[in-house]
Amino acid sequence: MARVAVVSFRLGGTDGVAIEAKKWIDALLMLGHDVTTIAGDGSADIILPGLAIGARVPPTPNAMNRALGDVDLVVVENLASIPLNLAARDVLYDALEGRSALFHHHDLPWQRPHLAHLEGPRDAVGWYHVTINELSRLELRERGIDAVTIMNSFDCAPPPGRREVARDSIDVHGERLVLMPTRALPRKNIAGALTLCESLDAVFWLLGPAEDGYDDQLDALLSSSSVDVRRGSREGLDIHDAYAACDLVVMASTWEGFGNPVLESVTHQRPLALYPYPVAKEIAAYGFHFFDLVDVAGITNYLSSPDMDLLANNLTIAEAHFNVAALPGRLQELLATMGIE
């Protein structure tokens, strides 16, 4: 079995990259590989602060090489995909010379307007690339890099949440509750979610915090709305409780590399109102039934008379195409093409 290092800006958190990296780590361990985790922030076997997003000083080349040691494979989780710490990326590139590396691309710079002028991923002999959607795979191919797509995967039988406990905790009782289980950033389109909630006369629960300096804008947006809002989780609640508590999940984002709440709404058997961002169209093409964010009439009809078959059919599709139970096998096949057993 192989010795594998998994490297990222941060690991062990609740952001999408960290969550999917954990699934890959678990799959690699299940396959019998020896895994070492390396990150700039969060929870990892080795913390190199210079790898973190926004770190002022990158790791030294010696520190980077010592952390990698004599592993057989380095899995790079987004650190070389999106330029959020250029100096750390370049130190890592140097350390990867002559090594076998697998780049797991969650985002690419040209997909973010403020980063589009910066360099994208590099390629070299012995380096392999995985994207989480077909759009990114095709965009890499246009730039001379071959990749395979492995979409994010999910537990299709998550623990049941405690609906009434969660609703009591956030002081919601007979009202309709719309959950947005994301962070708050401009591209998350909070305004679109609020407009829907106003039309549905629903309470809006924004689960994640504001990030990247969006606090003041978010406060102004929420205070100017007539919608009854809940923010953040509550002590003792988990994500499964939040999904159980809601009547509808909303994903109003105008851009996501994947958008985990889309499939989480399916696995937790909740209807979803969705803005049709590009990768969402890829996901919906598998046959899922989601509501358009502006389809107020359709959503209202559903909430008045829920269709359990719709939810069951969505779950069946997820089990066939997005099941985390299939991830070890998919990674095993990929590693075999790289000569790693």
Image (tube, rainbow, N blue to C red):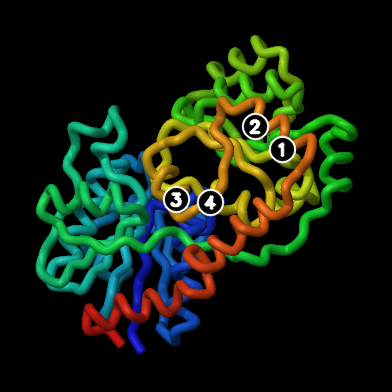
Please state, as top left, top right, bottom left or bottom right, where the N terminus lies in the image.
bottom left
Q: Which mark is residue 288?
A: 4
Q: Amino acid at mark 3?
A: Ile
Disc 4 packing (10 Å; few <14; some 14–19; many ≥20): some
Q: Say left or right for 106 vs 81.
A: right
Q: Amino acid at mark 2?
A: Gly
Task: Give how far across and how far down residue 223 sits, in percent.
Answer: 67, 13
In the displayed structure, would residue 276 be above or below residue 164?
A: above
Q: Nearer the viewer, residue 87 or 271?
A: 271
Mark 3 sits on what residue? 283
Q: Is residue 200 visible?
A: yes
First reached walking from the N terminus: tag 2 or tag 4: 4
Tell me the quadrant of the picture where the C terminus can be found: bottom left
In the image, residue 273 sits, relative to residue 58, either above or below, namely above
Residue designated by label 1: 302
Q: Residue at x 76, y 44 (%)?
A: 306
Q: Label 1 neighbourhood size at 10 Å, few (<14), some (14-19), many (20+)?
A: some
Tell me the CA gap for discs 1 and 2: 6 Å
Q: Sequence-wise, which precedes: disc 4 or disc 3?
A: 3
Q: At 59% across and 15% down in the image, what residue appears?
A: 221
Q: Position of residue 121 (x, y in %)?
A: 20, 51
Are the residues tagged 1 and 2 within 8 Å (C-beta)? yes
Q: Determine whether the residue tagged by mark 4 lies in a helix, strand or loop.
A: loop
Could you tell me how far apart the alpha carbons at marks 2 and 4 are, in whole angstroms? 15 Å
- Residue found at x 60% / y 13%: 220
Residue at which label 2 appears: 298
Labels 4 and 3 touching (C-beta < 8 A)? yes
Q: Secondary structure at mark 1?
A: helix
- Badge 1 vs badge 4, beta-carbon distance below 8 Å: no
